[in-house]
Image (cartoon, rainbow, N blue to C red):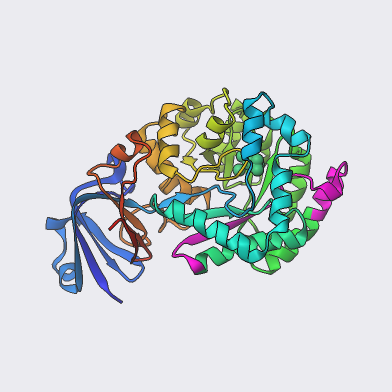
Amino acid sequence: MQTQLWRNANVATFHGAEPWGWIAQGAMVTAGDAVVWVGALNDMPISVKNSVMHEHDLGGACVTPGLIDCHTHLVYAGNRAREFELRLEGATYEEIARAGGGIRSTVAATRAATEDELLTLAVARARALMSEGVTTIEVKSGYGLSEADEARMLRVARKLAYVLPLTIRTTFLGAHAVPPEFEGHTDAYIDAVCDWLPRLHDQGLVDAVDVFCERIGFSADQTRKVFDVAQRLGLPVKLHAEQLSDQGGAALAASFNALSCDHLEYVSAAGIDAMVASGTVAVLLPGAYYFLRETQLPPVVALREKGVPIALATDHNPGSSPTLSPLLMMNMACTLFRMTPEEAWRGFTVNAARALGLPDRYGQLRAGSRADFAVWNTDHPRDLVYRFGHHPLSQLVSGGRLVGSAE
Ligand code: DI6
Ligand code: FE
């Protein structure tokens, strides 16, 4: 197991009481896939120093935990550029969905693709996320909408972790839309989803369960049916909640101790209180807010005042958030949602880890953490939130291995 010293760095650990968990003129020692020591170089214990076999001089660069994208729909085929034009001409996202476009058009393209084609497309997208420092990705199903097609999507997501040096968490989102063969039979479709879930779980394909709880998706009662099955199987739940309207989804999800409620533009005060009580993370998705030209802001001030942890994610998907830039999402979280740059960073690191129910070795840099980190061409991570459209990653380390560099 190689012990490596990464010195001459400013480290944002997101651990401890300091803003940013900041360590100026810091150094980090990794052994195998773990961080064994982080601190000011002068404080390094002699025993740690003596164990070092290899040194990297980072030249005063800034180091952060590897980013965690805790909400993506990364596996799909086709694109929805035409739908974008229709929306610019005046059609709304909901109108397009009700007319059979939207999610359903991506379902048709995804069903028509082979598993290898889906993997090739997803790998390219995952690489783009890695080029902005991502080392962990949550991937949802939801464009298959049959047992076999959902299984295929989840298998492709699992394969990503073999093809690329990433941690992948899969989420079953069978209840994303009603497929054409169940048109007009939403309750029967929910029964089918509840029937598939135990078998998908048996195949080791599911880490968590999600539902699109929305006027154009599924009701709170239908959501509860799916969550009941998840709970019986011991699977954690999360929810697409109150993106376009208040359906009481956040309170329902909280009653199942949901890991996260995502979107939340229309969440009520009661919904927030329920999330506080259950320790549920709020995942805000500025890409979808921006791309759908929404005007109802998520209640950042109330979430902050009540102490709800806030995570951010790309929500990468072809319909409402076709972005692969976590750094741009951080910038938008500040400009659009009035979050602080430090909050934005915590949203893609420590709080994103929590939103995925990952052990605390993810999303922070301290002794015992997984050695997932990014080295940036700047001296402070606030600089990466302020700029946009740059390519500031210098090196990416996943599980202690250098997996990408700008050189
Ligand atoms: N909310 C979203 O933002 C995506 N799914 C969801 O439930 C949109 C998915 C799509 O339009 O394809
Ligand atoms: Fe989503």
| Residue 345 screen position, x and y as percent | 38, 42
| Residue 140 screen position, x and y as percent | 62, 52
Instruction: Answer with the quarter of the image where residue 372 lies.
Output: bottom left
- Say whether residue 191 is left or right of residue 342: right
- Nearest the eye: 64 or 23: 64
Q: Which residue is drawn at 64% across and 41% down?
A: 80
Q: Quadrant of ligand 1?
A: top right
Q: How many numbered discs?
A: 0
- Say whether residue 178 is left or right of residue 364: right
- Nearest the eye: 18 or 153: 153
Q: Is residue 7 visible?
A: yes
Instruction: Answer with the quarter of the image where residue 121 lies.
Output: bottom right
| Residue 95 screen position, x and y as percent | 74, 30
Q: Residue at x 80, y 58 (%)?
A: 195
- Say whether residue 94 is left or right of residue 270: right
Q: Is residue 124 magenta?
A: no
48 shown above or below 272: below
- The span picked out in magenta is 163-192
Q: Which residue is drawn at 13% across and 67% down?
A: 46
Q: Report the quarter where the C terminus lies.
A: bottom left
